[in-house]
Each structure stands twice: as C-alpha cells, then as structure tokens.
Image (tube, grey):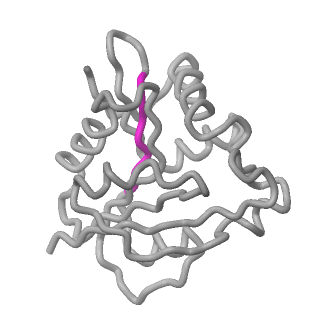
C-alpha cells in the first residue's frame, strides 16, 4: 500500500475520496462542494492500494486556541502547538488501512507538537475510531452531547444516523507528548 500526502488533487481522486466519504459517513452528511472546501482547508493523507484510493485522513497543525475556536468549543488560554486528526474514512475496514494512515501522519507531522487531538463523532451506534485512537495512546478527555443539534435544524449538517435533528456526541480524544 502506498500512502501519499497530496496538496493538489485531480477530479478522479476527489471523486474517489467523496465516494468513500459518503460510504462511511453517510450520503448527504456533506455535499461534494462542502467536502472539497473542507479538504482544501486542511492537509490530507491518502492511502492508495494498487492504484485504488482506499482511504484518507484530514489533519491540521495549529494551536490549542485555534482548534477549540474552529470547533466552537470553550477556548483554553493555551497556544501550545498541536496536531489534530480530523476526519478519516477507509473503504475496507479491519485491513489496517486506518492504522497505516494514522502512523504515517504521526511519523511525519509531530515536529514541535505538544499534544495530539482528535474530535470524534459518536452516534447511538458508538464510536468507530475508539480502538484505533487508544491503540495510538489517545484517551477520551471530554464529551459534548447533542453537539450538532442546532446545526442539524438548518441545512448545515445532515446526520446519517439521527437524520434531523442530530443527537450525536462530539468526543475529544487527546494525547500529551511532553
């Protein structure tokens, strides 16, 4: 398997990424235009196996203040540099794709970082990322119940589990490095 960090994307790759996104996070959660805008705001690592796009991870390097502000959460008085693991989706589960993508990210983007954060969507069906994150030493430190409730009342977000309104929880996972 080949893991790439891409800064330029062609339409074929974007279409494949969006298909995986819809397959794993639900059709309509983000429309294609919003999905592409999100990718352009953050870095993305793409897993390719035999010329097939099989997964991705969006991530960002920022400060704690910037992260909490972006997520509309209470902002700490900290400018520590952090790595944030955002959305990850893989085409085939239990094949090690997610682990390889996270490992690649951690091996290459931890310079000058004090903590790793990962905001996680938890529905009534559970948290798919829990085991993966704990395998890399991240622990759940905070939960925000009904986090997307207000957004789901408008046209901003559509929850593939709850529909509208959304009663899902935002869990924050973290690992302090030093």
For residue 79, side relative to residue 154 (left or right): left
Residue 92 screen position, x and y as percent:
42, 25
| Residue 22 occupies quadrant | top right
- Residue nearer the viewer, 69 or 142: 142
Q: Is 32 above or below relative to 76?
A: above
Q: Quadrant of the N terminus?
A: top left
143 relative position to 112: left or right: right
Q: Indicate yes or no whether the magenta region holds residue 59.
A: yes
- As drawn, the residue found furthest toward the bottom would be 77
- Front in this rendered view, residue 18 or 98: 98
Q: Whole-percent x and y of residue 73?
A: 55, 78
Residue at 55% x, 68% y is 70
Residue drawn 55% across and 16% down?
12
Q: Which residue appears farthest toward the top when viewing the image? A: 50
Extent of the magenta region: 54-60
- Along the line of sight, which residue is nearer the eye, 127 or 109? 127
Q: Determine the main secondary structure of the stretch shown in magenta.
A: strand
In the picture as drawn, the residue positioned furthest to the left comes out as: 178
Name the residue rendered at 43%, 32% in the picture.
Answer: 90
140 relative to 32, above or below: below
In the picture, measured across the screen, residue 25 lies left or right of residue 13, that is right
Q: Which of 36 and 48 is in front in this view?
A: 48
Q: Residue at x 26, y 22 (%)?
A: 2
Q: In which quarter of the image is residue 94?
A: top left
- Quarter of the image containing the C terminus? bottom left
Q: Where is residue 88 in the image (x, y as percent from the top left)?
A: 44, 43
Q: Name the residue furthest front.
A: 125
Q: How many marks?
A: 0
Asked if the magenta segment contains residue 25, the reply would be no
Vertical side of 5 occupied by 77: above or below: below
């Amino acid at each position: 398997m080949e893991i790439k960090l891409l800064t330029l994307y062609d339409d074929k790759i974007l279409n494949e990424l969006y298909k995986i996104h819809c397959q794993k996070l639900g059709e309509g959660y983000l429309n294609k235009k919003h999905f592409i805008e999100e990718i352009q705001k953050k870095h993305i690592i793409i897993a390719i196996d035999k010329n097939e796009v099989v997964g991705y991870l969006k991530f960002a390097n920022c400060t704690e203040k910037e992260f909490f502000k972006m997520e509309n959460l209470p902002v700490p008085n900290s400018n520590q540099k952090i790595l944030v693991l955002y959305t990850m989706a893989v085409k085939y589960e239990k094949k090690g794709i997610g682990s390889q993508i996270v490992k690649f990210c951690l091996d290459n983007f931890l310079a000058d970082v004090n903590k790793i954060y990962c905001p996680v969507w938890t529905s009534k069906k559970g948290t798919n990322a829990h085991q993966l994150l704990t395998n890399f030493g991240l622990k759940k430190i905070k939960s925000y119940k009904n986090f997307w409730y207000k957004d789901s009342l408008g046209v901003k977000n559509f929850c593939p589990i709850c529909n509208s309104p959304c009663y899902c929880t935002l869990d924050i996972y973290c690992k302090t490095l030093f």
